[in-house]
Amino acid sequence: MKKHLLIAGLSMFAVGPLAAQGGGLAASPCPAGTSTAGIPDSQRAAQDACTQAYDVYQFMAPQLGVALAGGNAMLGQGSVLGGLGHFSIGLRGNVFKGLLPRVDQFNESTNGAQQQELPTKDQVLGLPTADAAIGIFKGIPLVLTNVGGIDALVSAAYVPTVNSDNVSITPQHNWQFGYGARIGLLSESIVVPGVSATWIERDLPTTDIVGTDGGNTLAIRNLKVKTQSWRLVASKSLILFGLAAGVGQDKFDQSADISATVNELGFTGTSSPPNTKQSLTRTNIFGDLSLNLPFFKLTGEIGRSSGGTVNTYNSFAGGRADRSIVYASAGLRFTF
């Protein structure tokens, strides 16, 4: 079944019982069904397509999380803003060299799941995001700095509604807002760097994606993507340039209702895996370089996300779903 339209939709936003060769799962997560006199029932006819759909979802989910989370919560900043009356607004894009399954080259069996290596292709993936920081508390004055300052953080993500002949992407609402906070451990001054700890949750709106190809249908409904990130960041402004570096952790929680319907080679079947929740924790390190312009700051960032385990039944030619990902970000920030 050609599911490339569905994967294109995913790339717009993107627990195994035993270890085994392939992607780590010893058995397919989809119902096996039965065969009588060589004739499969509905579930067995669709099991292989259902398994591939599950594996593609597992494979894309960590990439989608990286595209949404990025590195520094507020690109180019490591210090709180300085209390009430101060704010910062930024636009950024997170991009990385991702892998897309070549679903147009998948082969499906109509007699149960067949473990195989699924083809992939290199693809630049990413998401644009917007964020804002609002000064709440300046902090407690100490010699040359303040400690304990507080900023409120807000983020926004957008998913479009798409309806074409073969694929539909239908979010419950197009915009999804995130929230968080930044605590100043040291406020930046002439001689003291800014050091802060941040926590932020960024989500995507709950979305349905349905792709069809002839008599075949692949549906991912109630897709939910939530990221919770904490960061420890240090920064210092050097008149024309600014530097920031940090380390942190991301937790990606994602779930969906997945189903596959097959109508080919004289067989018709529908199958759904019973458990499509994924929770993954990864370490994130990054560095920022900023150009300080009047009223605005241009920032570039490079970082690396790694760690955690994601198992699939099939393997993928480009590597595991939980491989390390190096990403880059660029953005523009206005601060007052």
Image (cartoon, rainbow, N blue to C red):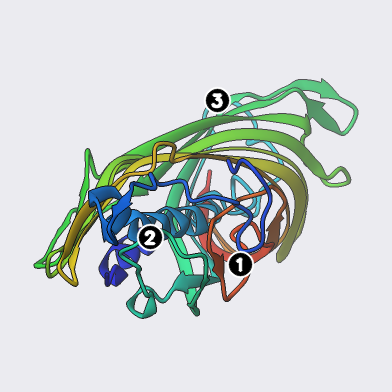
Precedes in sequence: disc 2 or disc 1: 2
Q: CA distance from mark 1 to mark 3?
A: 32 Å
Residue under numbered circle 1:
328
Precedes in sequence: disc 3 or disc 2: 2
Expressed as whole percent of the image width and height from the top left, the position of residue 302 reads 68, 65
Expressed as whole percent of the image width and height from the top left, the position of residue 229 reads 62, 38
Callout 3 environment at 10 Å: few (<14), some (14 to 19), or many (20+)? Answer: few
Query: Which residue type does callout 3 highlight?
Result: Leu
Residue drawn 77% across the image and 54% down it: 245
Residue at the extreme left:
165
Nearer the observer: mark 1 or 3; the answer is: 1
Q: Is residue 100 left or right of residue 214?
A: right
Q: In terms of depth relative to the viewer, which is nearer, 125 or 168?
A: 168
- Figure label count: 3
Q: In terms of depth relative to the viewer, which is nearer, 290 or 84?
A: 290
Residue under numbered circle 3:
84
Q: Of helix, strand and loop, which one carries label 2?
A: helix
- Which quadrant: the N terminus? bottom left
Residue 215, compared with residue 260, is above or below; it is below
Expressed as whole percent of the image width and height from the top left, the position of residue 126 reads 47, 64
Callout 2 environment at 10 Å: few (<14), some (14 to 19), or many (20+)? Answer: many
Query: Which residue type does callout 1 highlight?
Result: Ala
Q: Of helix, strand and loop, which one carries label 1?
A: strand
Residue drawn 77% across the image and 47% down it: 247
Nearer the observer: mark 2 or 1; the answer is: 2
Quarter of the image for residue 144 reads top right
In this view of the protein, can residue 329 be seen by the observer? yes
In this view of the protein, can residue 168 be seen by the observer? no
Residue 151, compared with residue 271, is above or below; it is above
Residue under numbered circle 2:
48
Q: Of helix, strand and loop, which one carries label 3?
A: loop
Precedes in sequence: disc 1 or disc 3: 3
